[in-house]
Image (cartoon, grey):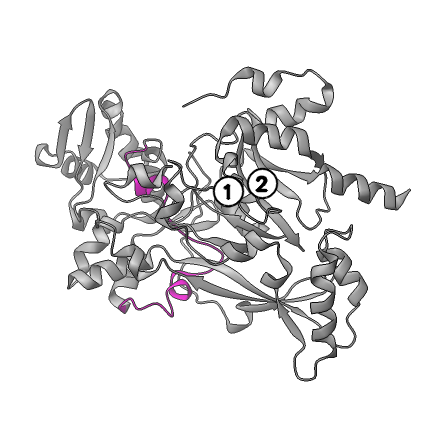
Amino acid sequence: MRQLPSYVLFGRFDPRYVLLAGVMVNLFLNSPSSAQITSAENLGVILGGSKMPLSDTLTNSAPATPSESVFEANPGPWGRLQCAYVYLEAPKSLIEGFPLPSPTPRWTLPSSVFSEVPALFARAGLSQTIIDQLLLPQNVIKRDGLVHILPPLPTLENLPPESRAIIYTEFSKYPENEYLVDPVLIIGTSVDEWYRRSKLRPEIIQKIKKMSYMRGETIAFSDIPALLNYASTDSEARAIFKACTRTRNLMIRLMLDKNANADEIIKYWSFGVGIRRKDLEPLVLSIMELEGVDDLGISHLLPALARKLLYTYPGLDMAKHGVMPDCHWTSLNFFNYEPHEYLLDARLATSQVLENFTPVNPPYQYADVLFFLDNTTGDAFHSCVHLADNIVFTKNGRNILSPWVIMRLEDVKKVYLYKGNGRIQGFRRKDIAAEKASQTE
């Protein structure tokens, strides 16, 4: 893993910089970001880039009630926010450009740890008969320092979810197992609800349910290659792959009825200090005066670049700098009219945070950048932008199949803090922090 030069992080020993330096040690390294499909075979150059508590049962059968799909956020200075869950899938034009993975299930690990596999399978609760079957000579290929285990499809399909979770957690340590490292994550709902309005046949959805397992509090599915065996045509295989890019996010509207506190709302969405007030005030007031219209899409409240990116997928043109935008590029560009591409560079992005941001504690305010930090190393492995009431703007992964979305912070935690070894630290732009402080004096 490429390390940042020490002078970037620790060139100044002012104690004010100690926390910031620790946060930024690994800010822009290529650590995996777990969210949906993050790579496909033969596309590593373009896409770039544990053990967990197990639930006793896999609770993925009860569909969500309609009331859970639409809800109102907690009230606050941000106004009344009506939220609805919607699902995005990568566009067909993007999926058609991807080579589908081989339908042969495969687990890959270094030759040096292959001797430990029988004990792992036993610890996962597999019978000796199943272990012997998985390790038959025809199911094991050794090549170039790696061992590829090719589990027979019926055996793979019938693994209990608890066994699958133990095995996949261990094998996710090895990046060659791309779908174990970055599984499809079904957050906060059931498999049935997640795919309820998709175009998948019920039989395919049942296969997903059968081969799902728990990763922390989240349902995970890693057997995309195996699932392709049940496609009846090439077009259905691509439809299955497309459905595996499915992402749940929030569509939010600001309610602006006659009782809304216009001045408080405008102040909040102007970062609390009047930045962009001239852009927001005319729009908010005009909606409040208009008969028959009493809401405004939240995208109209965001800065230009975030408004442009929201609910979209990155195009291949964004790979022109040799690396795709990720969560940190997204968070640090939040205020910008056009993206600052130098933020793809770890050294310069570190400098941006050190020079322009200061740590803050909850309650977080609009446009605070929330960094997810490793408790041991202080490394930042994810970031997002706080909008209101623990609702955030984020991009989950440095890849072409991860869109820019709005999510509840609790759902983002389920993606990134499931190992229990991380925490969140907020950062605020120094000029905004200083002006807010002056207002309270």
* Rendering coords of residue 367 (x, y %): 66, 48
Residue annotated with mark 1: 327
Where 85 sits versus 127, above or below?
below
Q: Amino acid at mark 1?
A: Cys
User: In this view, which residue lies farthest toward the right?
Assistant: 441
Residue annotated with mark 2: 332
The magenta stretch is 175-201
State the CA–CA distance, disc 1 to disc 2: 9 Å
* Rendering coords of residue 165 (x, y %): 36, 42
Of the residues under marks 1 and 2, which one precedes in the sequence? 1
Where 26 sits versus 236, above or below?
above
Q: How many marks?
A: 2
Residue 206: quarter of image: bottom left
* Rendering coords of residue 155 (x, y %): 19, 47
Question: Label 2 crowding class (10 Å Cα cut-off): few <14, some 14-19, many 20+?
Answer: many
* Rendering coords of residue 47 (x, y %): 34, 41
Q: Is residue 253 magenta?
A: no
Q: Amino acid at mark 2?
A: Leu
Image-based side of 361 in relation to 223, left or right: right
Mark 1 lies on a secondary structure that is helix
Mark 2 lies on a secondary structure that is helix
